[in-house]
Image: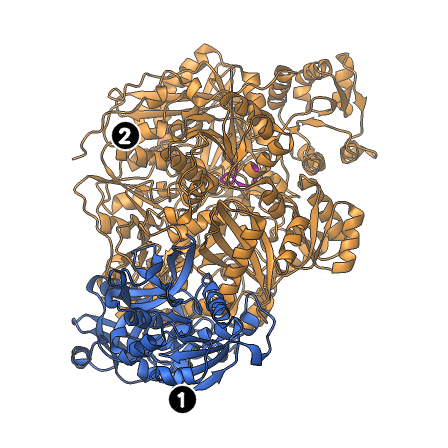
Amino acid sequence: MSDTHQKRSPEPSRLVLADGRVFRGWALGASGVVTGEVCFTTGMSGYQEVLTDPSYHGQIVTMTAPEMGNTGVNAEDDEAARPALSGFVIRRSSPRTSSWRAEMDLDSYLRERGVVAIEGVETRTLTRHIRDQGAQMAALGTEDVATLHDRAKAAASLEGRDLASEVSTPESYEWSEGLGVWDPEPSVAADPSTRPHVVAVDYGVKRSILRCLVASGARVTVVPAQTSAADILALSPDGVFLSNGPGDPSAVGYGVSCVEELLGKRPLFGICLGQQILALALGGRSYKLKFGHRGLNQPVKDLATGKVEVTTQNHGFAVDVESLAGRCTMSHVHLNDDTCEGIEHAESGAFGVQYHPEASAGPHDARYLFSRFMQRIEASRA
Amino acid sequence: MPRRHDIETILLIGSGPIVIGQGCEFDYSGAQGAKSLSAEGYRVVLVNSNPATIMTDPEFADRTYVEPLVPEALEAIIRAERPDALLPTLGGQTALNLALSLSDSGVLEEYGVELLGARVESIRKAEERDLFKQAMEKIGLACAPARIARTYEEALAAVEVIGFPVILRPSLTLGGMGGGVAYNRIEFDAAIRWAFRQSPTHECLIEQSLIGYKEYELEVVRDVADNFAVICSIENLDPMGVHTGDSITVAPAMTLTDKEYQRLRDAGRAIITEIGVDTGGSNIQFAVNPADGELLVIEMNPRVSRSSALASKATGYPIAKIAAKLAVGYRLDELSSELTGTNAAFEPSLDYVVTKIPRFAFEKFSGADPRLTTQMKAVGEVMSIARTFTASLQKACRSLETGRDGFVSLLDEVDYPALAQALSVLRDRGEMPNVDPLEDDAIRPPADELKAAVLEVVRTPLAERLWYLGDGLRLGLSVEELFEATGVDPWFLAQMAELITLEDELKAAGLSADGELVARAKAAGFSDDNLVGFGTLPAEGARAARAEIVSPLFGRVDSCAAEFETETPYLYSTWPSAPGEGESEVRPSSGRKKVMILGGGPNRIGQGIEFDYCCVHASFALRELGYETIMVNCNPETVSTDYETSDRLYFEPLSFEDVMNIVEAESPDGVIVQLGGQSPLKLAVPLGRAGVPILGTPASAIDRAEDREQFEALLEKLGLRRPEGGIARGIDEAFAVAERVGYPVVVRPSYVLGGRAMEVVHSQAELSGYFKKALEALRGSESQTILVDHFVRDAIEVDVDCIADGERVFIGGVMQHIEEAGVHSGDSSMVLPAHALPPEVLASIRSNTRALALELGVVGLMNVQFAVRGSAVYVIEVNPRASRTVPFISKAIGVPLAKIAAKVMTGVKLDELGLPREILPRHVAVKESVFPFSKFPGVDTILGPEMRSTGEVMGLGATFPEAFGKALLAAGGPLPESGLVFLSVRDADKPAACELGMRLVDLGFALIATGGTSEALARAGVEAEHVLKVTQGRPHCVDRLADGDIDMVINTTEGASAIRDSRSLRRQTLVAGIPYFTTIAAATAVVAAMEDRRGAPMTVRALQDYHKDGRLNRGSVPPRRAD
């Protein structure tokens, strides 16, 4: 992919927030009007991973980094079969794609995948607005301001909505792909028959998580979000993984009751929404952050070792650590705002982190958590 | 782990004089380090030979030594101060090498000094090429195929395996010194000898050329608990093959997918861990194959670097400060970035694009090879911040002060076919023919020929290749063709192509361009002047017309892409993507009075750190008085662009438009233009015209001093003498003036700094040759006049800096040049106090200075240059502004001149500051200059009226010989203690040479001399071996030099042909690294210094001891409310 693509002649488009604030730009990607909760992410790399991360379901995502589309898109970097976000907001799209990995340019990809996007937005001003006013619903498209404002005001908030079911797999499947050439520490592939079996509950799982599990030595079966504990146990897992996913954990009641049943029976590991579900199953509470943590640079401290990890984060809700007092311990803390970034349930060996150890996009500092999970599985099998 | 309590005193080593490859970024890092260690309660002992640094301001450390950065001096300081630890990672390669040497010689062990920041093994592992390669192999990372060589034979064997082209990378050198690219055996033979000589370990890596690979850098930090963070990723627009200091670089990386970027990050972590840097920062360079993403490690610097200064400014994350704290035991999670209050382990996120463009000075070094290779040649750099790459690129282009108003067309200036031809000659013969700029009426070649020429020219990396690429696109070359020719990533080329398309659109639209198009142009970074040039804005009232459509916004550098609310004092301008969009983040009003200080722009020859020092001092002084200070500058190396220096920092070009934007946003009560050198000074008149209040000396005084007719009237009124001369507006007028006053004449364009295009010419033929160069230098300046003055032969030059408040004058210092008149004052060594002038001459100099300052109405600083012959005192030049000697004098007399000047500019009187008429130190201070000739083989090293030094050192001592000896040592390393001295002097110098010869023999040296000098010595009864001149047959003196027989050279010449004849001699001394002196005055001083030093141990003394009487605090007044 090396041709400089012709930009379409600019068509004015706008993003209108529920509070009436209007941001103007030009249409990019698919046409139409979309609504969603407007948020921002500060990651400077990995826009394609953002586009395909199912955790962004229901959201209009603003990229704070201004130059987008530079390296185009490629099949390998998709984190899911299709984009789940509602809309995509950027400052500028590249006049040209330049990467040996590129298979398509950003605009074509957005159109092909039906993502409504806008460029030319003063994203720093938008980000400051979201930061100051908090997350809110918005509408994006080429319609007039009044129409978009009405749509934004009418859009249902993410709180209390079960978004996980909407992005989960309809059926179970086996996953066998590892990290391949991108594995920083490739290990010798074990015989599949002796690999521990991990059942991953898909609340909106990113492929990179599955790849990391495989790379850590697991045989992976992915099951739909609403799979019952009995059905999971029927698969004879050695460990159960609770995936990331979009939205409010309190709306995923089926997940919480499933985990309540699994606790103590198998080693459990939850990431992001999976961790929040684990916390709720342990009797804790979650709450909505003002504008969430979304980026690839979030410093987290492992309270057991004192080590700092630079992590990928993408969450609008968090675990209220007070609510878990006496039930489990906080294993990781965010160094900027002291929010809970990980929990450890010593009794059952279940643990979870709020951030994304699989990264993609983001730094690999926390990959050790997959090994920790595998070690717990080994220990419980012995 | 908190701060260490087992250490109390820490020795901090600076990087010495500004040289190519080691600029004022190490003053920035050293000053930050000193400040933060002091704040932690440590006793800081600091040493640096460069007086123009902020770090050597006595208040930055407990003990400050301005002493040569040589092991002997360091040992003396260690003996006197008994530090517990030494932090060598903030002072560049100089400090690191010095620390290694002190470790090797056992000094550190003897005095129990612990090395902080990086251990000896780590430094060696990172810096010694074969150890580094082994370390990389161990962690599974690839380097370019390469072999290490310590002998010529080994090197040759290596090339046979690797194959041409090869890159040579000597061990332990700075700025890629001694490195290069060789395409064939002939180039290789020359290059490898040069490389071995430059390496202190006589070791060189012969590496397969990765020309065309993409180049990236990571700035990383790691703490004692193995916590790690990447502060900034940097992508080089110029691919591999060009030193990163000479490359245009962009942050963050633009053309990597996340998977590729994380692979770099993982490699960065593995490298810093393996090398063992566990308490500080490092810079790691990578090459990436654009075809398949293959990753190769190039090198790593286990210390803060030029790139880390850039990264600090690009991100707002103070790397040096954090590195200093990590070195004393803190962990990242215990520290916070004060800019945003976020944790120090929080990797900065940028919501803007940063572009750095290097600033070159090839115009100062005629005959230099202009090709950019792995040995750095840039003398400075600019950085710009904007929301998009195109805007950032254009802003950086106009920050350069090269007369290029952005990414403009050079099709009317550059003769591409001739340039292509000259480059081909350069490749074949190793010498570059001169290429004249196009005449206005030149006939353009056919389009195809021009296109082919541009395509050919861009294949060679040159200082202005970026603009040539733009012209290629203008002529219709495709992104693919240019990528193929240059290896510049197509993404960057496509961005440039978009600018050219927009340029065409703007030209086509003309004055009928709609608001949307104008806004788009501004968002893409075009200046108002560009738009006037395209016909899109009217020439008259362009600014107002544009302001009706769109105005700039200001964004904050906050390290977090606005994730957190911050009130950072660090701002940049940006243009909304459409009229009315976006919000500005300027919060101008504080209720206090505000002063805006315009900085000096990029470092270049003639305008360096000295001016930044003055700006920084002004900010400190005015904050002391209760003012709010606003700094404007675009040089990322400096202390002025540390966001802590002023109440607010605007990282912006020093163009009228950009400065006015800030003025309109801030409405300062006054603007200071006289401290930052020529860049801000030339804005004085346009800003004044726009109604901006200029503080201090009025712009009219500048005119009176610079405008020849007004200046002559001024001198006449005061009854002062000047060499006869006149103004010429063309070559014929110049001939006439020269005839009238008599040759030799000194010629120069008016309104230029650093003697740009200044020359002494001896004949009409030389004068006409001079003219072309002068016209080039005048590009972009308002005045087109040439000054022609009689050159006063054999005169002694004197520089005076003073401060006036309109009523009284304080003389900072009267400095006597050591070289005779004719050598630019910036290149000349100087001594304070003037050591050999009769009292009546000194009195006349002082009274002349006072008269000039009062008559001109100077409020602030003024510099006067005098020529003295016998008892006659001539005024050569008056500059009502800061000069480059201000920091030297301040350190010598213990009074901070720039601070006082800034206060005076706001209306404080000298009397209130308690200043006497003058302070005469009891000790002696010598300023010696440092030259970049070793970077430019082929350039004549003889000194003249055109300034060519990049930096300076100061030698302090009880006597002139002691101080001069230290200055020489600091500038160029040790003088020989025995051996053979070569003498060849012009007739006028022969008597003095005979006396020197005698003294040298007494010192135990043997002499060797050419014809006339040898005869003169014989007549004087001094024994000397006779040797042939180069023109007399072989073996001649240059052969003897090449054989390594000669240890020091004294060679003075006069007249163009004698200068030409002796050129190969000077050249060879440079190659051989032998001390050489081209004026008899300097040679005399050197011999005195050698006599002084003989056998005596070096004595060192801290500034705090020199100025025990507390003079350093003089000039302080109780803070007054500025309202």
Task: Indicate whether residue B1063 is drawn in magenta.
Answer: no
Q: Position of residue B934 (x, y in %)?
A: 63, 40
Image height of B895 relative to B465, above or below? above
Residue in the foreground of this view, choosing between B120 and B1096: B120
Chain identifier of the blue chain: A
Q: Which residue is mark 1?
A: A171
Mark 1 residue type: Glu
SS for dot 1: loop
**Residue B712 drawn at (x, y percent):** 38, 29
**Where residue A157 appears, x then y in whole percent?**
21, 76
Q: Which element type, helix, strand or loop, lies under badge 2?
A: helix
- Give the amino acid at mark 2: Lys
Over which residues does the magenta segment extend?
Answer: B87-94
Q: What's the CA distance linking mark 2 and mark 1?
A: 77 Å
> Would you say A133 lies left or right of B466 here?
left
Q: Position of residue B707 (x, y in %)?
A: 38, 36
| Chain ID for orange | B
Tell me the subunit letter for badge 1: A
The chain under label 2 reads B
Who is closer to the viewer here, B203 or B613?
B203
Q: Mark 2 — residue? A: B903
Crowd around label 1: few <14 · some 14–19 · many ≥20 (10 Å): few
